[in-house]
Image: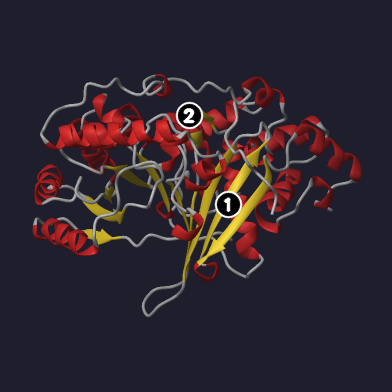
Amino acid sequence: MPNLAPPIVQPSLAAIEALPPGISGVTPDALEAWFAAHGEPPFRARQVLDAVWRSGAASPAEVTTLKPSLQAALGDAFRWDTLGDTEVIATEGGLTEKALHRLDDGVAIESVLMRYPSAPGRRERATLCISSQAGCAVGCPFCATGELGFGRDLLTSEILDQVRSAVRRLAAKGRRLTNIVFMGMGEPLLNLDRVLEAVSALNDPARLGLGARQITVSTSGVVPGIRRLTGLGPQFTLAISLHAARDPLRDVLVPLNRRWPVAEVVAAAREHARATGRRISYEVTMIGGVNDTDADSDAIAGILRGQLAHVNLIPMNPVAHTPWTASPMPVIERFADRLRDAGLPTTIRRNRGQEVGAACGQLAAERSGTPAPAAVARRRDRLVASSAAALRGERSREAVPAGIDAGTEANSLPTAPGIAGATRRAAGGGARWHGARGPR
């Protein structure tokens, strides 16, 4: 396996901007325009898209339908893959694979592939969890990515190439990808333009062709992003990382709650469900003695009652440098029963891949090295004190995490020259969300 340590480095925006665009992030229209500029017919774009998304060609040289001079020009104009070295660690008999990908500026990101064997009444599934940012600005203390801090937004091609990597690994075993969730490193709605471009590519029958309802985009509660999605009316699933319905506690667990309180988040999600007809998925990481009490279940039931909603309860993955552990399963089951009694559909999710640090950011955090013991002790003491204050009903006095408001504005990285118009139209100018269908 390649040595990827340390995974998080200071990103070089200038270096990324100077590189050719990744081929996976180029729209069919833009690719046709490129071939037209080279005196080639539009069907050449279809041949390249098939090579990128269907045949698993490793380079332009393997697109044998193109003459060598055109292969060379394509290789000069576009990066065939934006992922450098990729380390894959498997567990659970190969059912879970954690991939640590090195990008061209040295930054590392993670994706997790989870296979679910067929069972009576249920076909085999393969779900990929992908990252939308390197690191994360939100800083949820139970999340390993939050320990890494924020690096940069990912380009559309860097998001999509995580998917291409998983598709190739599955194809080698005669399997296919059935679901994608944007629940890896980063806050997707703080990189919304590029997330929408990626979803458009994943849903496009000319590219991956995955049904919109097989795609889930998660957010910790970026209200302007939720409202923007509502205006676009996508048919993919919106998931809200809720974790607590009491503001004092959610201030600690989801620091951007200090900017957009839980009632405002849920109201935006409710309007999204009304506008799209799609049920909202609410995620709750269950932390022992912190957010797993009857008062917490009753607060969630009170704020979600009567909505088009589904609650997923997820035992906390062990994360270094926190004082917390997962709630015991009997406690989680009682919590779920109280939500169901209140009329909320509720599922308890099983953790996957703990042996390989499959929770977002865990493997990257391990590769980045161990912080000084004094820093670990200060972090743990602060979390103990802040969670105790929250349980007493005291609102946090800490500032909103840096970069949260800035992330709701225009992206910091421009789209590569020559493809801006096509990609922006796909993202924000009436993107079409195709019905449920699997990859061809």
The amino acid type of the residue labelled 1 equals: Ala
On the image, which quarter does residue 393 sit in?
top left
Quick one: label 2, few (<14), some, or many (20+) residues within 10 Å? Answer: many
User: For the C terminus, which image quadrant?
Assistant: bottom right
Pinpoint residue 171: horizontal percent, then vertical percent: 64, 64
The amino acid type of the residue labelled 2 equals: Phe
Count every numbered label the image shows and give the total. Answer: 2
Which residue bears the numbered disc 2? Answer: 150
State whether residue 46 appears in this view.
yes
- Helix, strand, or loop for circle 1? strand
Quick one: label 1, few (<14), some, or many (20+) residues within 10 Å? Answer: many
Pinpoint residue 163: horizontal percent, then vertical percent: 57, 50
Near-viewer residue (112 or 118): 112
Q: Earlier along the polypeptide chain: callout 2 or callout 1?
A: 1
Pinpoint residue 254: horizontal percent, then vertical percent: 29, 35
Q: Which mark is residue 67?
A: none
Query: Looking at the picture, does residue 336 appear above or below residue 45?
Result: below
- Helix, strand, or loop for circle 2? strand
Query: Looking at the picture, does residue 90 appear above or below residue 246?
Result: below
Query: How far apart in space, not on screen, are marks 2 and 1 (Cα)?
Result: 19 Å
Near-viewer residue (157 or 248): 248
Which residue bears the numbered disc 1? Answer: 99
Horizontal placement of 116 versus 63: left or right? Answer: left
Pinpoint residue 336: horizontal percent, then vertical percent: 18, 59
Q: Is the image coloured rainbow, by chain, by secondary structure, or in one colour? A: secondary structure
Q: Residue at x 9, y 45 (%)?
A: 302
Query: Looking at the picture, does residue 33 appear above or below residue 56?
Result: above
In the image, farthest residue toward the bottom: 120
Horizontal placement of 3 versus 315: left or right? Answer: right
State whether residue 187 appears in this view.
no
Horizontal placement of 79 versus 242: left or right? Answer: right
